[in-house]
Amino acid sequence: MNDPVLVINCGSSSIKYALVPDSAHQPRLSGLAERLGSEDARLKGVDGQGRPFSRPLHGAGHADAMAEILEGLEEQHPVAVGHRVVHGGERFTRATRIDAAVRRAIEATVAMAPLHNPANLEGMAATQALFPDLPQVAVFDTAFHQTLPPRAYRYALPDALYRRHGIRRYGFHGSSHAYVSARVDALSERRHGGWLIAHLGNGCSTCAVWQGQSVDTSMGLTPLEGLVMGTRSGDVDPGLHAHLARQLDWSLERIDTLLNKESGLLGLSGLSNDMRRLHQAAAEHHAGAELAIEVFCYRLAKSLAGLSCALPRLDGIVFTGGIGENDSDVRARVVEQLRHFGLRLDAVANADTVGGREGRIDPGEDGRAPELWVIPTDEEGRIAEETRQLLQEEAAHAPQ
Ligand code: ADP
């Protein structure tokens, strides 16, 4: 393998990893340690020979799981480690070499990403201990959105909350939006134009990109704002919190759990957070599943229409993430709700562009209508690329 970068993505109870070679033509080793901290903890993935494996980790936490992952990669000799970090606040506008000061700055944003940033820090500590000589780089989900203008990132709240406490919109899924917008700029003849990206996975967000820069996005201070997601509510009336506290005597923790874990597709359908399961149930006329899909698509169309205000010109819409890459029905509904933007769908291309295929799904007859694309995201690839780029820049500037 050729100078691979090890990409680590630590979630609250999982660690995803990928060993990304410097050529797109070589295979990637990847895997997932999940349900960490529980008796069912497991490590599964693909080994150096392309064989799938799965083994129990019996109650392992992040540090034990990381040691197990790194042991399995000992033969591979990564040249650097790129860590996905969820929240970088306003300080981090690009990938950054990790040192003690950077770790302290990430600790300072823990309050804004209480589930994710502590896990990211644990991942850094474990890799540092096991690979003390490898350069470690943090790539922030928020960094791509640091180009938002104040009109997009400020809430209509008293100024002091922003100045003293950093209360503003940050946006997330930055590596995905950055990868997909760069890819559509490379594929389309309308280079460096105005694109709306819909990243639709378990977490969902939209982003408006003008000439390669994020100019607005649907997520805010936390990854709860915006679209309907798997278990997250997205936008609700902010008055809901006070109403639940006063009328039902709910605690802040109870409200937080409701909005993050019990809402979205799961809450609306009363059935599942998995879009595939909802389509099956809707085909059998399950009213909750039908409603969940309808609200998901309508709110997504509304978000895209709203974000179009950030663009001087709309060149097209790109779908990505598990739902965006696979769900031709959701794509068709959203396009139908945005017909007044001149959008048209090629039904055959839409049905065919699933399962990791990349391509255009509009008929392309009218050269002026916005284009429609499906582009499978590659967050690991983007994190590896930014890690490599930083190290090359450092080498170029190092004293001879
Ligand atoms: P994550 O945000 O965890 O990375 P993914 O990007 O893998 O999530 O997306 C998960 C979502 O994608 C789930 O709602 C899943 O149902 C949906 N999904 C995956 N495959 C399909 C498919 N063939 N059709 C519809 N939805 C799909």
Image (cartoon, rainbow, N blue to C red):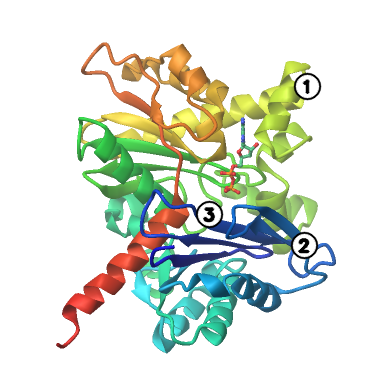
- Residue 249, quarter of the rendered image: bottom right
Name which residue lies at 30% across and 45% down. 182
Give the residue type at disc 2.
Answer: Arg
Q: Is residue 192 above or below residue 129?
A: above
User: Which disc, if any, is residue 55?
Assistant: 2
Residue on which disc 3 sits:
223
User: Which disc, if any, is residue 286?
Assistant: 1
User: Which disc, if any, is residue 74?
Assistant: none
- Residue closest to the far front: 49
Q: Nearer the viewer, residue 226 or 95?
A: 95
Q: Earlier in the sequence, mark 3 or mark 1?
A: 3
How far is disc 1 from disc 2 in space, using C-alphas? 37 Å
Task: Give the quadrant of the N terminus.
Answer: bottom left
Can the viewer see residue 260 in this picture? yes
Give the residue type at disc 3.
Answer: Pro
Where disc 2 sits, the SS reads strand
Name which residue lies at 51% across and 70% down. 76
